[in-house]
Amino acid sequence: MAGLLAVMLITLMSAAQAAPVRLLVFGDSLVAGYNLPPDAAYPVQLEKALKAKGLDVTVLNAGVSGDTTAAAAGRLDWALADRPTHVLVELGANDMLRGLAPEQARTNLDSILGKLKQAGLPTMLVGMLAAPNLGADYGKRFNGIYPDLAAKYGLPLYPFFLDGVAGDARLNLGDGLHPTREGVAIMVDRTLPHILRFLGQ
């Protein structure tokens, strides 16, 4: 009987390890692929990169252009209906661009991360940086949101989603805010090692 139980446990563990990953990328236009062909959006390029590494990962695009942290918090349950196994949270850029109080963004992100923790979903946080023209005080209050919340929840943090792309006209659309296909490719390349570690690879 004990031998049978051991075999069953090993079988169940092997099945769990082989289970495909469903990574939900929960964010705004930087995730949605604003003004890009569907195959150029970050989640699509990321899935391709992960599969090239031999991982059985489906990357779910839960980006909505224009979303603030408040709007995203209101649709979290809807996004989780896709039954992800892991979640990457990228939000806050629109709060910052609208000059909304960083304290509001902090509260909304805290709520989102709290719900994901309660749901038992492994989560990675992706940060944003305030534009310099908003001033040093705003920048300090906004930029501190991400490391503070990552520490509070014990989450891996990628500090700045647009690292290597922001401010480079060759890698951004005409609005200077949204990356081109090539810009997204750089974002995937830079975030990939962090996401591999997050997924336990």
Image (cartoon, helix red, strand yellow):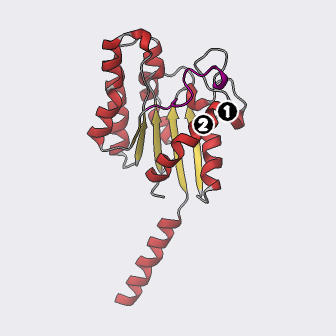
Q: In which quarter of the image is the N terminus?
A: bottom left
Relative horizontal placement of residue 164, taking residue 7 as reference (left or right): right
Q: How crowded is mark 1: few (under 14 residues within 10 Å), some or many (20 or more)?
A: some
On screen, 11 above or below 107? Answer: below
Find numbered disc 1 in the image and state the secondary structure of the residue it sits on: helix
Cα separation between marks 1 and 2: 6 Å
Q: What residue sits 26% from the left and 38% below the top?
A: 152
Residue 45, can we see it? Answer: yes
The residue where tag 1 is placed is 182
Q: Are marks 1 and 2 in contact (CB under 8 Å)?
A: yes
Find numbered disc 2 in the image and state the secondary structure of the residue it sits on: helix
- Name the one closer to the observer, 7 or 36: 36
On screen, 65 above or below 76? Answer: above
Picture coordinates of residue 179, whole percent (x, y)? 62, 26
The residue where tag 2 is placed is 186
Point out which mark residue 152 bears: none
Residue 82, can we see it? Answer: no
- Name the one closer to the observer, 170 or 14: 170
The boundaries of the magenta stretch are: 160-171
Relative horizontal placement of residue 151, taking residue 24 as reference (left or right): left
Picture coordinates of residue 173, whole percent (x, y)? 66, 20
Q: Quick check: is 90 in the magenta stretch? A: no
* Tag 2: amino acid: Ile
* Tag 1: amino acid: Glu
On screen, 19 above or below 75? Answer: below
Picture coordinates of residue 13, whole percent (x, y)? 44, 71
Quadrant location of residue 6? bottom left
Picture coordinates of residue 137, whole percent (x, y)? 30, 13
Q: What residue sits 33% from the left and 31% below the top?
A: 111
Q: What residue sits 60% from the left and 30% below the top?
A: 32
Question: What secondary structure predominates along the stretch shown in magenta?
Answer: loop
Quadrant location of residue 34? top right
